[in-house]
Image (spheres, rainbow, N blue to C red):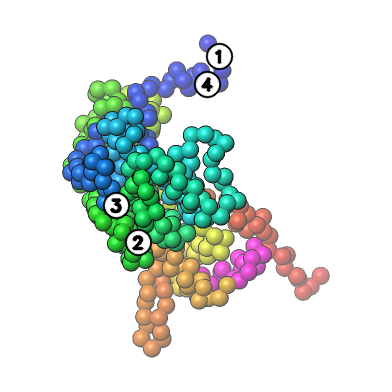
Amino acid sequence: MYKSVFTKHIDKRIKIVKNKSALQTSYLPEVLPHRSREIDSIATIIASAFEGDRPSNILIFGKTGTGKTAVMKFIGNELKKEDPSGNTCAYIYINCEIVDTRYSTLQNIGNQLIMDFEKRIPFTGWSIDKVYAEMKNIIDEQNKVFIVVLDEVDRLVDKSGDDVLYHLSKINEDLKYSKLSLVGITNYLKFTEFLDPRVKSRLGEEKILFHPYDAQQLGDILRARASIAFEEGVLEEGVIPLCAAMSAQEMGDARRALNLLRVAAEIAERSGDTSVAEAHVRSAKNKIEMDTISETVKTLTSQSKTVLTAIIYHSKENKTLTTGDVYSKYNELCKILGIPVLTQRRITDLISELDMLGIVHARVRSFGKAGRTKEIELSIPQEICDMLADDEAMKALKTYKPPSQTTLFK
Ligand SMILES: Nc1ncnc2c1ncn2[C@@H]1O[C@H](COP(=O)(O)OP(=O)(O)O)[C@@H](O)[C@H]1O
Ligand SMILES: [Mg+2]
């Protein structure tokens, strides 16, 4: 029975994921296995807010996917449970990946507290001093303890310096009634090395490190999520241990582990299977890797894409490739593409960058007196090479026809 082009696909697809959102990384679970120690350490510090004291500032370190954001959001919810009216304590969360300037940080903190839309701090136009003064007044008026979480705080410092941290960390000197504590979260273990020493000591009054998860811990996290996401029996036995083992081997990153499980379930669903098997996990891993490489290649600059194209061109010849080989082909391609030709030295740097990104593999070889050179090998699959050939920046190469040979004899 024909209804629309979608009908047959909808009917054919057997839904094996009961609750998709539970596998999304933005989902905040009610329990966070293997983080009770970290939650407890943070809670002991913040608890002093309920005795009217200013909790110490906290700096949370840990690699990506170790649950830092999830834990701080969990703490935010717990604060609301303890103080439903919000009379004692206010929780303000800022994602510095999005809010990354001095102005927007102060404005954002202020506006989270201003309910009257008319009175909000405008997006631009005020002086920094005025924004700071306004934000400080609103905070002080409310007479309570503020917990200000700056997630991915290194982004803010990268983009706008540590000035705003300096002012926020000494704001208590200007406050009469309220108190403010900062919780900075960062993936970079060396974050504080680049801070002004005063900011460093104020922000790092307490430091908490989140360790990567091991395979067993990832397995527990996945099992907790899977029980919400899937009906019983949908996951074959080896699936969670495999996802956990693969992700533990990489970084101990719970985000990757969850993604792997989600993509595996999507693959199973799309191929009309009724359960998720280890084979689906393997395809998922492959797909995620391919997506990552293709994203990396897509976002290269035109110059790097040209260098990579030169390497791909040569790699078909099956000989050892040197920087010189790449450079001469690169020169030729630049002329066809109509882009500036960089020096060989710059190209050597770009090749090293491609090496760091895992797109090519470059080895330095020395030949005694003859000097040193790099041997370059491609480390991406054919699909990605094909994708690059279709890239907007490389399009001119496809339509290019070498000028017809001028013949000497007519
Ligand atoms: N202990 C845990 N229990 C359950 N889910 C977790 C746990 N740790 C991390 N997650 C989940 O893994 C994903 C990544 O965690 P996140 O807190 O964003 O990591 P980080 O901020 O350290 O990069 C999120 O979806 C989060 O809910
Ligand atoms: Mg985070």
Q: Are circles 4 and 1 on residues that touch, CB within 8 Å?
A: yes
| Residue 334 is inside the magenta segment | yes
Q: Are circles 3 and 2 on residues that touch, CB within 8 Å?
A: no
Numbered range of the magenta stretch: 324-341
Q: Which callout, 2 or 1, points at the residue further toward the start of the chain?
A: 1
* SS at badge 2: helix
Q: Residue at x 34, y 23 (%)?
A: 18
Numbered badge on residue 3 = 1
- Viewer-nearest of discs 2 and 1: 2
Question: Depth check: 396 or 160 in front?
Answer: 160
Question: Depth check: 206 or 236 in front?
Answer: 206
Q: Check disc 1: other Cα within 10 Å, few if <14, some if 14-19, many if 20+.
A: few
Numbered badge on residue 321 = none
- Viewer-nearest of discs 3 and 1: 3
Determine which residue is flagged by label 2. 199
Separation (CA) of disc 3 from disc 1: 60 Å
232 up-or-down from 101: above or below: above
* SS at badge 1: loop
Q: Residue at x 67, y 64 (%)?
A: 338
Q: Are circles 3 and 1 on residues that touch, CB within 8 Å?
A: no
